[in-house]
Image (cartoon, rainbow, N blue to C red):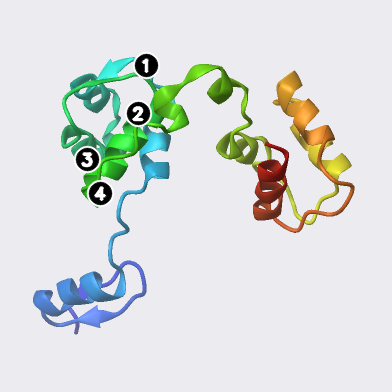
Amino acid sequence: MAQFTCEICGAEFEQKSRYEQHMLTSHPQQAVSAADIEKALKDVEFPRSRNELAEAVDEEHLDVKDIIKHLPDQQYRDAADVARAFGELRTHEKSADNQPSKTGGEHAMQSPSAARFASLFAGMHFPASRAQLINHARAKASEQEMDTLKQFGEHNYKSMAEVTQELNQID
């Protein structure tokens, strides 16, 4: 009779080493993504230092807490700062200094964000017409975002990717 059973697929193993090898090869743990970090920091108020961010992450997100502890020791003014530092940590490359999240300014504040539009359409079922997009976003969208949506073409959008393409053409 097997002593070790995989909780995911039910495979059984006589030896612990074979069970552990199975877990590593058949069910590897996913690497932490920028989205995971954003989710772990969703209720955090900025600005915060690296250590304050690590303390703010709950026990459910220990892998994110560990990554935050490895970020540069600096003050983070928003989630974009954290995401940029995470990207630099992951790729070992410094981000360009002319990114809107770094440079800010009037244009960055006025330009519609693809990430923001994606959040407006969370739970949206595609394909969707412009009217359906407007109706779905109405409760959460700002006046400027609604004006941008009204500039969209009158056709069905098959996916969020098509919505993003349309947004890029308007910007």
Q: Amino acid at mark 3?
A: Ile
Q: Is the Cβ of the residue at disc 2 closer than 8 Å to that at disc 4? A: no
> On screen, 94 above or below 126?
above
Could you say which is closer to the camera, residue 160 or residue 107?
107
Dot 3 corresponds to which residue? 67
Q: Secondary structure at mark 1?
A: loop
Q: Secondary structure at mark 4?
A: helix
Kindly report which numbered mark, 3 or 2, lies closer to the viewer in this rendering. Answer: 2
Question: Distance between the Cα atoms at labels 2 and 4?
Answer: 14 Å
Question: Can residue 138 be seen?
Answer: no
Question: Distance between the Cα atoms at labels 1 and 2?
Answer: 10 Å
Report the residue at 46% width, 21% height from top: 104
In the displayed structure image, the side of residue 15 where residue 32 appears, left or right: right
> On screen, 13 above or below 109?
below
Question: Distance between the Cα atoms at labels 4 and 1?
Answer: 23 Å
Residue extending farthest front = 98
Question: Distance between the Cα atoms at labels 1 and 3?
Answer: 18 Å
Query: x and y percent of residue 132 in the render?
Result: 84, 42
Q: Is the Cβ of the residue at disc 1 closer than 8 Å to that at disc 2? A: yes
Q: Secondary structure at mark 2?
A: helix
Q: Is the Cβ of the residue at disc 3 closer than 8 Å to that at disc 2? A: no
Question: Distance between the Cα atoms at labels 3 and 4?
Answer: 10 Å
Res. 46 mark: 1
Question: Distance between the Cα atoms at labels 3 and 2?
Answer: 14 Å
Dot 4 corresponds to which residue? 90
Res. 81 mark: 2
